[in-house]
Image: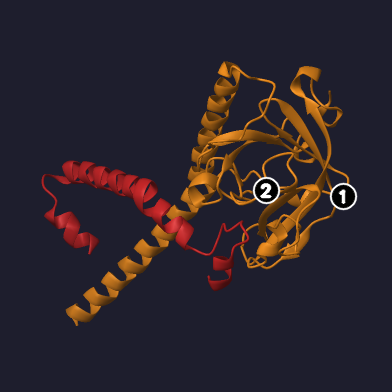
Chain colours: A orange, B red
Amino acid sequence: MAVARNLVRGLGEVLITLGVLVLLFAVYQLVYTNVQANRAAAAVGDRLEDQWAADPNPVKDSFAGIQTGDGFAFLHVPRLGATWRKPIVQGVAPDQLARGVGHYPDSAMPGKVGNFAVAGHRATHGEPFRDLNRLRTGDAVVVETKANWYVYEIDNDGEIVLPSEIGVVLPVPNKPGVEPTERLVTLTTCDPRWGSTHRLIFWGHLESVQPKSEGRPAALGG
Amino acid sequence: MYGWIWRHLPGNNAVKFGCVMLIIAALIYVLFVYFFPWLDPRLPFNRVTVDEAEALS
């Protein structure tokens, strides 16, 4: 009798404990990862700006020697906010995505022929792409590097694909083996926001390049 | 389980309460700094890249 009662009580305690753990994990996801990621992204951004300020050759971009995890540019998306600006880090593993927007390492660099492809979290870990679904054809996406503003223009209203569709980040999207001739951008995130069954994809093409010496581009209020 | 732990903590009720607070703080620290970051990428949420490996997960 006592044994059975103790067992039931013990089982109840275990179940409540598991419930509390799940709750704590939700707090971790919804609060802690955002605080951590925003702090890490700010540090990446500050370090990058310091590097740029100290660079002896400020007028020519060079992406040589970039390591996984390094910040090398900033992404501006006016549709997501007039002051929306996130650092872009090399790599799309969880460690990199927790510090900013990640750059698919096999994809092109900003402004280059090919496809400059990036990924960002839509929920938790700073959720840079929380509102990415608001993007529309014609919206500006600007990549800020040491020397230039690369102004891209979005060409679609958001395509939902399966996570296995690696063709979307190819040099010519969905055309494996074809040599690229255009300078494109691709942004990927999850869909729906609180699940990862699919991916939300935006493509764009390079509209203009403006040296930083000429001030901010029109797309960013310059 | 919890009753057993409580009975085996040292000191009077005030001391036991203090111990429980410390244990909880330590557990939360281990969870948030070690366990949850380990667990997070292994769960099928928060996946934002296109990847051949994604097809398998």
Chain label for disc 2: A
Relative placement, left or right, of A62 versus B14 is right
Q: Amino acid at mark 1?
A: Thr
Q: How many marks?
A: 2
Residue A217 appears in view: yes
Chain label for disc 1: A
At horizontal 56% and vertical 50% (from top left) the residue drawn is A92
**Residue under pointer 1:** A137
**Residue under pointer 2:** A130
Relative placement, left or right, of A212 versus A42 is right
- Residue A66, by quadrant, is top right
Q: Are marks 2 and 1 in contact (CB under 8 Å)?
A: no
Q: Secondary structure at mark 1?
A: loop
Q: Residue furthest right?
A: A138
N-term mark: 2 or 1:
2
Q: A13 and A62: which one is in front?
A: A62
At horizontal 57% and vertical 57% (from top left) the residue drawn is B46
Q: CA distance from mark 2 to mark 1?
A: 18 Å
At horizontal 81% and vertical 19% (from top left) the residue drawn is A214
